[in-house]
Image: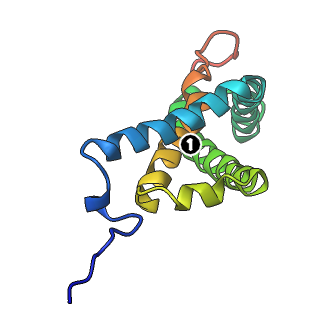
Amino acid sequence: MTAITTPRAGDPAAAPPGFAPRVFAAEAGKGLRLMWRRRAVVISGIVLNGFLYLMIQFFIGGGHLPLPVLALTLPGLFAYVVAATAALQGSGGIAEEVNGGTLEQAHLSPARPSLLAAGRLAALAVEGSSPPSCSPLPTGSGTGRTG
């Protein structure tokens, strides 16, 4: 007696060749399309995080913008914005899929869940890195101090 085996969901043998890059691109593309749909929120995040950065520097500098400190603290703001965006938008995206009923459909695909999560994280990384990379680093003009 022989048994017929059927490949399980997530089994690499069940997917056709080139399936993994397409799934990754589809998940990342879906996240980027959602970000484009919420572009007003992204643009306001860019502006508000720029103001937040300048206000923090203003309080650190005692009423002035100390130029040597600006460049040193920019990576910290970058890390904060990326982590906050990934946490908030990631959990919001999962809740959106639960409410929409599409999260269960993702489990039916032959793609590994880790591949779907990697595509979603790639879109969140792009969304999280867009506000700090677009925020201008102020120069010494108009600060009243030279260093």
Quarter of the image that includes the N terminus: bottom left
Q: Residue at x 59, y 37 (%)?
A: 31
Q: Nearer the viewer, residue 90 or 111?
A: 111
Q: Categorize mark 1 by other alpha carbons within 10 Å: few (<14), some (14-19), many (20+).
A: many
Give the left or right position of residue 50, taking residue 2 as reference.
Answer: right
Q: Residue at x 73, y 58 (%)?
A: 98
Disc 1 target residue = 124
The answer, for residue 132, to whether it is visible in the render is: yes
Which element carries disc 1, helix, strand or loop?
A: helix
Give the left or right position of residue 12, taking residue 130 as reference.
Answer: left
Figure quadrant of residue 14? bottom left
Counting from the top left corner in percent of width and height, residue 93 is at: 69, 49
Counting from the top left corner in percent of width and height, residue 78 is at: 56, 39
The answer, for residue 69, to whether it is visible in the render is: no
61 to 136, vertically: above or below: below
Residue positioned most to the left: 1
Q: Nearer the viewer, residue 99 or 64?
A: 99
Figure quadrant of residue 95? bottom right
